Image (tube, rainbow, N blue to C red):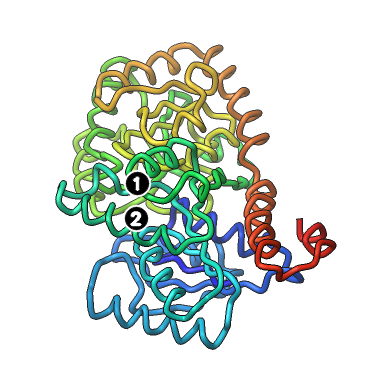
Amino acid sequence: MMRVIARMNVGGPALQASVLMRGLDPDVFDQRLYTGVVEPGEADYLDLRARDIAPHRLSTLGRSVRPADDLRAVASLVAEMRGFRPHIVHTHTAKAGLLGRTAATLARVPARVHTYHGHLLYGYFSPAKTRLVVATERMSARVCDRLVAVGTRVRDDLVAAGVGRPDQYVVVPPGTALGPLPDRAFARARLGVSGDGPVVAYVGRLTRIKRPDRLVGVARELRRRVPGVRFVICGGGDATAEVEAAARASGGSMRLVGWRPDVETVYAAADLVLLTSDNEGMPVSLIEAGLAGLPVVATRVGSIAEVVRDGVTGLLAACDDAEPAAQAARLLLDEPLRREMGRRAHAWATQRFGPERLVSDVAGIYTSIAGERGWWPAREKEEAR
């Protein structure tokens, strides 16, 4: 098994790749992880939360499109595949998906799997660039044995765009766990947030598609509706400077804590979690919020509705400032409702999004390919499951 991901920056794809590297039975699956380097301003998930995983680093593999480096990355991957001779190459993220599947085709790797942790169909590029992305994804899908989507909405969007056939897809939601939550007072003190007033947390990248400008706008409106509310923002990205500027103008109500290995401390300090994105796959931060027993207020995009059950484990809202602020105010001002939604969120996340389920689902995909290819006899297939 060769797993290829452009970079292991903090986020859902890196977390999922790490869960699989740790969780798949090493007596059945011989895995290698190939990855590039994170961009300036990003945190490396391997350094922050997964020092036990030893990757194979390719300096030419990364997020940015650089034709010369991309060609060298393909050549390096082809050489590694010919040396390692994997049965399956599994790619994660768009850039690695294109380069990894191209290399696997050139190296004649028998089987290819790609995971869509989201998609780039809207919100990222101009219409012309989006058409190019769609054409590239359609071409790459043709050389795959399986296409994995993190949610049904993500799958349906891709199929509607002509990316792959419906029978190629398997929906595999993320799976993760959360460390023990510290005491609320301890967590707030550790983050520099004092007192018992309401706290809203944001956990994720501060980049355009996540709409940090909307996050700032929602915070401004929510402060008007709920005096004394404070915000803890855990993460970073190319929009960090503008959020820092908003924090300085907020009178101390917004606190940026950067990327942290102890993300459970952020959740322990909070009363609810907020997400303001224009486009998402299935955000792991919202799963973690549920595991922490917190309700969520989020924009109604991507497969978020498959994590946040609207009116049950949280509240979904339109992509503007007013409605998310109104929904957050509703929860902050109604403690019984907030606590009930938090209890339901914990039960739902624990049942649906555990790491064992993710590992089992992906092992089943690999096992089914091995069976189709005749690599394993029936008894070994059952043992692998």
Classify 150 as above or below 81: above
Q: 201 or 275, which is in the foreground? A: 275
Q: Secondary structure at mark 2?
A: helix
Q: Could you tell me if residue 189 is visible in this image?
A: no
Q: Position of residue 294 (x, y in %)?
A: 54, 29
Q: Which mark is residue 175?
A: none
Q: Is residue 23 above or below residue 310?
A: below
Which residue is depicted at the point 67% across and 57% down?
Answer: 368
Residue 81 placement (x, y as % from top left): 51, 81
Residue at which label 2 appears: 138
Residue 1 visible from this viewpoint = yes
Q: Residue beneath label 1, please?
A: 162
Element carrying mark 1: loop
Q: Quadrant of the C terminus?
A: bottom right
Q: Which of the pair 56/213 is nearer the observer? A: 56
Q: Nearer the viewer, residue 351 or 183?
A: 351
Q: Position of residue 109 (x, y in %)?
A: 52, 75
Q: Residue 138 placed where, x, y %?
A: 34, 55
Residue type at the position of mark 2:
Arg
- Image quadrant where residue 53 sits: bottom right
Of all residues, the one furthest to the right in this rendering is 379
On the image, which quarter does residue 103 sit in? bottom left
Of the image marks 2 and 1, the number of the one nearer the N terminus = 2
Direction from residue 361 to residue 246 in the image, left or right: left
Category of crowding for the residue at label 1, using alpha-carbon neighbours closer than 10 angstroms: few (below 14), some (14–19), many (at least 20): some
How many other residues sit within 10 Å of disc 2, few (<14), some (14-19) or many (≥20)? some
Residues at discs 2 and 1 in contact (Cβ within 8 Å):
yes
Query: Disc 2 and disc 1: Cα gap in Å?
Result: 6 Å
Amino acid on which disc 1 is placed: Gly
